[in-house]
Structures are given as structure tokens and as C-alpha cells.
Image (tube, rainbow, N blue to C red):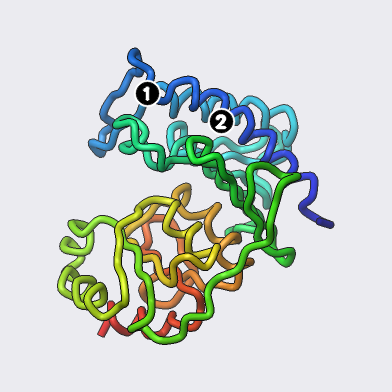
Amino acid sequence: MAGYADDLSLAHMLADTADSISMGRFRALDLKVESKPDLTPVSDADTAVEQAIRSTLARARPRDGVLGEEFGMTYAAAGPGSRRWVIDPIDGTKNFVRGVPIWGTLIALLEGDTPVAGLVSAPALGRRWWAARGHGAYAGKHQHAATRIQVSGVGRIADASLSYASLDGWQQMGRLQKIVDLSLAVWRSRAYGDFYGYMLLAEGALDAMVEPELSLWDVAALIPIVQEAGGTITDLAGRPTADKSSVIATNGLLHETVLTALTR
């Protein structure tokens, strides 16, 4: 995979380390959980995973910056550059601390503000997803046991399967009735939540995934995977997603229909 082969190989190595740490703490009786200022939980696994990833990146990519959910932005020793890694050590911490296996480590590489490579590792599910710009999206247990994935060909909203997150978030935006109406218009709706809905979309098992607000570390790794699988991912205004923005991801065929349903 010319251009990003080394970066993706590194991302898999980072994920191996992350998986080892997080699985060692999953359902641990002595797991330490605290509340952050925004009242979301953080466990000792979150911080340990991010510290390990940062340590490896500091050695392997000293010219790249690193943005992580738990420790913020660190610029390269040489100063701000065009490349930065964006890390969510455990996406789905609430699931993690309750023993629900739907959680994962998200690793993205950005050039400027554009995510060009992304990897999602969900060790409790025994699965990974990854992609690099212009080279397709893949899923499997590891880098050498992979299958190329693509979004569905569903073109009618009445035939679509929709995933969503945070009804209270849509309510705070004043769009609760819109998401309810959309869920009633589709064939099936389920709240798989967090990264998992986007990965099911990329595999063609879902047709749309919507969230009212995400931070950059929540979505950066997902963008290349959805796009390289043939999908479309934007905010509610149809623009590229950014920090603290809404996220609408679809198989592409349904994108305008979903956007219209949530904004009309």
C-alpha cells in the first residue's frame, strides 16, 4: 500500500500493544474508574493504552504530532508539522467499565486536517477494521487475515437499516422528533453505538449511522474506513466532519435522504 504501508503497519503494532493492555483490564475486579470534568468516565485502561501508544509514536514517528483523548495535543520535537496521529485509547469506555464487549482502540493519521489512514481494533470482538486513502477498506482478525469490505447497495430509505446514538444529544439539538421520524421511516433501527455502527456500515450490514456530536478522536479513524468502503460521511450541513461536530455516515446512496430528514 504505497504511501501509507509503513504507517498502517505501525498502526497495527500500536493496536497489538493497546489490545494487550485493554484486554488485561477488561472486567478486572480492580479496574479504577474516575469521572472527568465533563462527567464521562475514564479508566486506568484508557490512560495506560494512550501512554503506551504515545511512547511508541515518540520513538517511531518523532516528526509527527499526537492528539489523544486523555492527554491532549503533543507537538513533535521539531515543532508543528503537517502530520499528526489522533488516538482514542478506548472508544466506548462506558461499555468497557460495564463489561460490554463493544469497545475499541481508534488510531488515525491526519495530513493537515484530512484523515488519510485509520484503524479500529475491537479485541473483545476479535476484529479489526482499517483503511488508507485510495487503497480500500479491510476487516479481519489482523493485518494478514483480511477481507476487503464495502458498503451496501440499499437505495430506498424504507429498506434501510439505521443505527444511532444518544437520543438525549438529539434532544439537546432540538432534533429529537426528526431522529424518531427517521427511525420510523426505515426498515430497522438499532442503537449499536460508538465506533461499531460505523464499522457495520462499512461492511454493508447497516446503511446509515448518525450521531449528534463527536470529538475528533471519536471520528478521525472512522472517516477513511467509511470512505474507502464506498460510503459518505459528513456533518449535518454536508461538510467534512470536524471536532465537536455532528456525524452522518451512509452508504452514499441514502446520504441526501438522511440529511434532509434530519435538517428539513
Residue 108 in the figure: left or right of residue 29: right
Q: Is residue 41 above or below residue 225?
A: above
Viewer-proximal residue among 1 and 200: 200
Q: Residues within 10 Å of mark 2 (few under 14, many from 20)?
A: many
Identify the residue at image location x=31%, y=70%.
188
Viewer-proximal residue among 75 and 183: 183
Q: Is residue 208 above or below residue 159?
A: above
Please tell me the numbered disc located at residue 27. Answer: 1
Quadrant of the snapshot with the C terminus: bottom left
Identify the residue at image location x=68%, y=57%.
147
On the image, the x and y values in percent for residue 123 come to 53, 36
Count of numbered marks: 2
Identify the residue at image location x=72%, y=46%.
145
Give the structural element (helix, strand or loop) at label 2. helix
| Mark 2, residue position | 19
- Kindly report which numbered mark, 2 or 1, lies closer to the viewer in this rendering: 1
- View extreme (top): residue: 30
Give the structural element (helix, strand or loop) at label 1. loop
Residue 70 shows up from this direction: yes
